[in-house]
Image: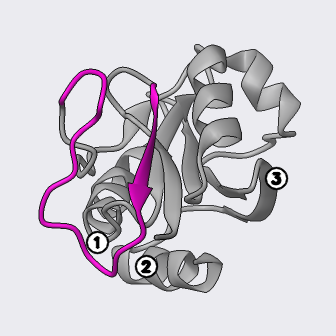
Amino acid sequence: MEKVKVVCPHCRKVNAIPVKESYAKANCGHCKNSLLDTKPIALDSAAFDDHVVNSDIPVIVDFWAEWCGPCKMMAPAFEKTAASFALKARFAKVDTEAEQMLSSRFGIRSIPTTIAFKGNKEVDRVSGALSAEQMQQWVRKIL
C-alpha cells in the first residue's frame, strides 16, 4: 500500500499514512490529535523547515503581516480553501514582521504572497490577495 508522509500540525512529528481519495479519520501516531485539522498553522523558521522538508503533500504558505489590509481581507478565503484540502495540502501562515529571515530567504517583496512548496521546492507563487475560488483553482493546479 502506498503511503504519504504528513507532518502533524500539532506536534510536528512525521506520520506515514495510506494514500486515499478521502479520509474519515487520521490521527497522529505521536500526539493522537487529528491530522485532518485544516486550520492554517503559524510557522516560525524551525517549524517551516519541519513541514516543508518532511511533507509529501504540498505546503501552501501565506506570507502576511498584521498591518496589511489585503492580508486581512484574504485570511477568510485562505481558511476556506484550507478546509477543502484536508490531507491533500497543508496550509500555513508566516508573519513577515515576526519572521523577517524567512521573508528574506524567499524574497518576499509584497504581501500577501502565497507560495506553494512541493518536494521541498517552491513550485509556484502568487502575489496579491485571492478570493477563495481563485485560491482553490490555484491549489488544484499544484496538486
State the residue at coordinates (47%, 74%): 135
* Circle 1/circle 2 CB separation < 8 Å: yes
114 is higher (above) or lower (below) than 106: below
Amino acid at the residue labelled 1: Ser
Q: Provide residue 57's location: percent of width, then percent of height.
A: 55, 59
* Circle 2/circle 3 CB separation < 8 Å: no
Q: Nearer the viewer, mark 1 or mark 2?
A: 1
Question: Closest to the observer: 132 or 10?
Answer: 10
Label 1 neighbourhood size at 10 Å, few (<14), some (14-19), many (20+)? few
Query: Could you tell which of marks 1 and 2 lies nearer the N-terminus?
Result: 1
State the residue at coordinates (75%, 55%): 119
Mark number for residue 41? Answer: none
Q: Provide residue 13's location: percent of width, then percent of height.
A: 45, 26
User: CA–CA distance between discs 1 and 2?
Assistant: 8 Å
Instruction: Read off the magenta span.
Output: 13-32
Amino acid at the residue labelled 3: Lys
